[in-house]
Image: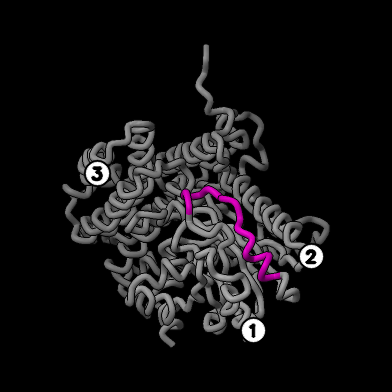
Amino acid sequence: MIALHLPASVQIALLGMFGLLLVATLVVGGLAHLRPERNYTELTLRVKTWWLIVGVFTAAIVVNHTVSVIILAFVSFLAFKEYLSLIPTRRTDHRVLLWAYIAIPFQYYWVAIGWYGLFIIFIPVYAFLFLPMRMVMIGETQGFLRAAGTLHWGLMTTVFSLSHMAYLLALPDAKNPAGGSVGLLLFLVFLTEINDVAQYIWGKSFGKHKVTPTVSPNKTMEGLLGGVLTTTALAVLLAPWLTPLTPWQSVAAGALIGIAGFVGDVTISAVKRDIGVKDSGSILPGHGGILDRLDSLTYTAPLFFHFIYFLHY
Amino acid sequence: MLRLLFFLIIIKPLAILVLGLNIRRHELLPASGPAIVVANHNSHLDTLVLMSLFPLRLIAKVHPVAAADYFLRNRWLSWFARNVIGIIPLERKPSAKGAQVLAPVTKALARGDILILFPEGSRGEPEKMSKFKNGIAHLLSEQTTVAVTPVFFYGLGKSLPKGELFLVPFFVDVFVGEPLAWNGARQAFMEALESSMQQLQYQAQIATRHAQEPPPQTQPNKE
């Protein structure tokens, strides 16, 4: 088996993830069977797509570092493409958009070779300065600020932020004997996604007080708190197996992922509301677009990365 | 063989990985010929992406009808257009007589081919639909048993608009409409076709919210 080079705890966690998915599939299947009068198509579709997501994610981490970086770069590409397809772009910026796409392989190349210095400034500094210059060279000033601003926001969210997931894999294994670099990525992605699900379930079950009535009216204080507590509890439970975090640090990491995940979620909701669409796309049946699934990670990935980088690397 | 490889190795991966298609009602596309598919025309990609929607085993039977003066203007392009894309060249000059102009098209339909036509005539402004030419009604009035399936693309005009050399990836929305049968009169048929296409365009605008005019909430605040 190709996954044998991974730490034992990571292998068990991966199996656990598939086990969880199996349970979810059985529960939804059972519900649909027991209550034929209710419509479970959406839920069934969503669970089915989760299999795809977990499958791709597993493929992204089990083979080797290069494959991981390529798959994560492709995920960034899909997210950036979805973002550009969603927002209004200027016809004159055709070539500028191409340059923005070219930033993706560069950013992930810095990740692949572990060049931290360039990884951390390439998009915030060089892409930020270069793309508006290209726009100016073309010469269209109508809508310039909006075009430059939206393009950079998209690169920062879908490429810069998400590439922190990949950079976790470039961190030295030796500093994390329990889970290695893969353990960190698994910890971040699993907790972020489970936090989404937990906030949804807590909100559905006990939700009363709206947190962000104008941006995302379905989000409630009860859902947020329930989700953050669930995620924190899971973080404490999983941290010794996957991360070098001490118990108190894992409490902080869990709360950070819970809260940041929520903020990432509502930030993308605000974008969708601004544009006037319900879903960011349709690539993931039952979920919507890829940004609908990655929204929380756009916040949790850089924040968790810098949290752990500051404390342990 | 060349066409099959071209679509398998270049066009299918391009459509699926680089662009990304979201196809509504894919099953309405004809599964056998003779049949006609018409689409809005914004980009050279329209033809290739539309052809990629057909299964590979049908590719040999799918032929775009394209302007002879444009695609046969030099040797290399002509070779590529005929042998790799498999176009049926059509004279656009008004001097030629109707029936003669359509002869190669009629022959292809008789062979049981699936033809792709762009009734707008040329690619025009990106993401804007121009008035349909009625050549297709002339064709149908002679081929009354062939059905016409309308397809609307949104996004390809952004990916590779007229005059641009480089392709920029965008997700593409594809809307397939119900096949239209010949209804006995040229003008009535053109009206039915245009209205069907406008409905698909409207569905695309609802789905993507990229209406031609800006939505009301983006109006500047005059307080």
Q: Amino acid at mark 1?
A: Gly
Residue neighbourhood size for the residue with mark 1, other residues' Cα within 10 Å, grouped as few (<14), some (14–19), many (≥20): some
Residue B159 picture quarter: bottom left
Q: Residue at x 81, y 61 (%)?
A: A36
Residue identified by numbered label 2: B183
Q: Position of residue B150 (x, y in %)?
A: 65, 62
| Residue A246 visible in the picture | no
| Left or right: B140, with B95 as reference point | right
Q: How is the image coloured?
A: one colour
Marks 2 and 3, how far apart at CA: 57 Å
B47 or A271: which is nearer to us?
B47
How far across and down, in percent of the image, does residue A234 sit?
Answer: 47, 50
Q: Which mark is residue A127?
A: 3
x and y percent of residue B154 in the render? 53, 54
Residue B70 in view in this figure: yes
What is the span of residues highlighted in magenta in the rendered image?
B124-140
- Where is residue B137 drawn, in percent x and y? 68, 65
Dot 3 amino acid type: Ala
Mark 2 is surrounded, within 10 Å at the Cα level, by few (under 14), some (14 to 19) or many (20 or more) other residues, namely some
Residue A272 highlighted magenta (yes or no): no
Find the residue positioned furthest to the top.
Answer: B223
Tell me the chief SS of the magenta region.
loop
- Comes first in the chain, label 1 or label 2: 1
Residue placed under numbered mark 1 in the picture: B112
Whole-angstrom CA distance, mark 1 to mark 2, is: 21 Å
| Mark 2 vs 3: CB contact within 8 A | no
Residue at x 46%, y 53% (from the top left corner): B157
- The amino acid marked with disc number 2 is Asn
Question: In the rendered view, would you say B16 is above or below B126?
Answer: below
Q: Secondary structure at mark 3?
A: helix
